Amino acid sequence: MEEIRQQQQQSSSFMVIHDALIVTMDAQNRVFRNGAVAVRGDTIVALGQSQDIISQFSSLSPQLLNLHGHFLLPGLINTHVHTSQQLARGIADDVDLLTWLHHRIWPYESNMTEEDSYISTLLCGIELIHSGVTCFAEAGGQHVSGMARAVELLGIRACLTQSVMDEGEGLPASWAKRTAEDCIQSQRDLHKKHHNAGDGRIRIWFGLRQIMNSSESLLTQTRDAAKELNTGIHMHVAEILYENQLVVERNGVDHGTVTYLDKIKLLQNNLLAAHTVWVNEHEVGLLSRAGVKVSHCPAAAMRMLGFAPIKEMINAGVCVSLGTDGAPSNNRMSMVDEMYLASLINKGREVFGKGTTDPTALPAETILEMATINGAKSVLWDKEIGSIEVGKKADMIVVNPSSWSMMPVHDCISSLVYCMRTENITSLMCNGRWIMVDKKILTLNEVEVVEMAKRASADVLKRAGIQIPTRMNFV
Ligand SMILES: [Zn+2]
């Protein structure tokens, strides 16, 4: 990796990375045992066998980087993460849903300043980068301008989304007075200010926190504004059974949120639906026909929501990707952990239907697709990212499998899902620029951010009047 560090110091922007096992995640699922990729500026300009690529470009004297013994993959894409909630890690462990939302998360979020969002996003970004994430979709948080400032510094990509609600029980006073029009206008302003910022790495989406906090006017205005600005909508969908019951009573539909969203024509191919746990077979068909993307967050689902019918969705042709959700509902913001969990819980979920697990459900190839190319489709960015292909942006990660956690490697594809740990991801490139080398992030000072985060988190909790009860017998 010394070579990467040397490259970082040189200004030339043409490099050939060679002698790597390259898992391209392209449409043919090509894997090069001894592959090379040429990167000019922010773009992949050639891909193939090492010897061919090196000789093809030898006259141009590119910087050569030998990755012998390493794997090269597309950057992972986390399609549901609450960057604003990183400072709230551990404030709501082992509590019921209502306490979680009304007494911990909403008071916390409503007391954040823009600087808190900035620091929270930096801390979250550090964890995302270490786990191989080059692009994420913010689930809807506070102070998008703070997030955008952090993403510019971090050097990765993001679809940023404001937390948007205009009705519902138990809302903090500062949120309860917002109208649907206020919500739309503030997001239009954010779009104008930040869309395509950071060399095109930042995109602004519309947010809908969830159906129970959205008037029909807000839903339809969001649908129309997103279409007008040609951007996406990120929404928590069918998270808990009670949500469906409320929608049936309130909106007179026969099942739940997905059926209602279909009725008001919000089910479209620019909708990224997070969780989507409580859906029936008919609704899976609706999602598939409309081209809705689903973000599966296995840790949060197991902890708070339930088992989503992911296998059925994939079989029906729904594009399913992976997300970590926020720190208070998962605690670990590692896509590597989510890949492992997604595979396991969807094998285990089969017990409910069949009385036995199905070890063939969601195999490693499917999980890798969910974490890469399906993620890119979910954030409407697949023409440029999600796979290692000529013409795409150079968003890639380097995996060092030579450790106790991955050795021996008899099946490199399964090893990436079942054995790889966050610690095996050593380097990360986004937009043709090395962001992490040898597990060291180059764009910021990690120690400084951790210190800032400790102070900011304590201050927010104090302002919000949140006290975490002690457990066990402290003496
Ligand atoms: Zn969420």
Image (cartoon, rainbow, N blue to C red):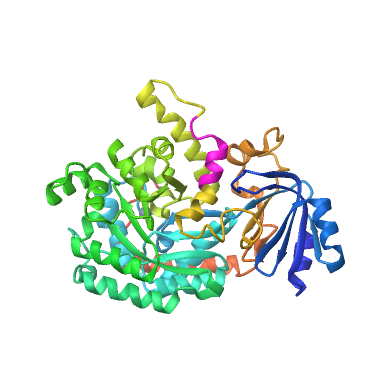
Q: Would residue 24 be seen by someone viewing this image from the given angle?
A: yes
Q: Quadrant of residue 224?
A: bottom left
| Residue at 56% across, 44% down | 368
Total marks placed: 0
For this rendering, which residue is in front, 163 or 102? Answer: 163
- Please provide the residue range marked out in magenta: 361-370
| Residue at 34% across, 70% down | 228
| Residue at 64% across, 49% down | 24
The question of residue 50 being in magenta is answered with no
Percent position of residue 255, x then y: 20, 42
| Residue at 24% across, 61% down | 219
Classified by dominant secondary structure, the portion drawn in magenta counts as: helix
Percent position of residue 193, x then y: 42, 79
Percent position of residue 80, x then y: 43, 54
For this rendering, which residue is in front, 302 or 93? Answer: 302
Q: Would residue 278 be seen by someone viewing this image from the given angle?
A: no
The question of residue 369 being in magenta is answered with yes
Q: Is residue 140 left or right of residue 417?
A: left
In the picture as drawn, the residue positioned furthest to the top comes out as 355
In the picture as drawn, the residue positioned furthest to the front comes out as 289
Q: Is residue 428 left or right of residue 113?
A: right
Q: In which quarter of the image is residue 254?
A: top left
Q: Is residue 211 left or right of residue 271?
A: left
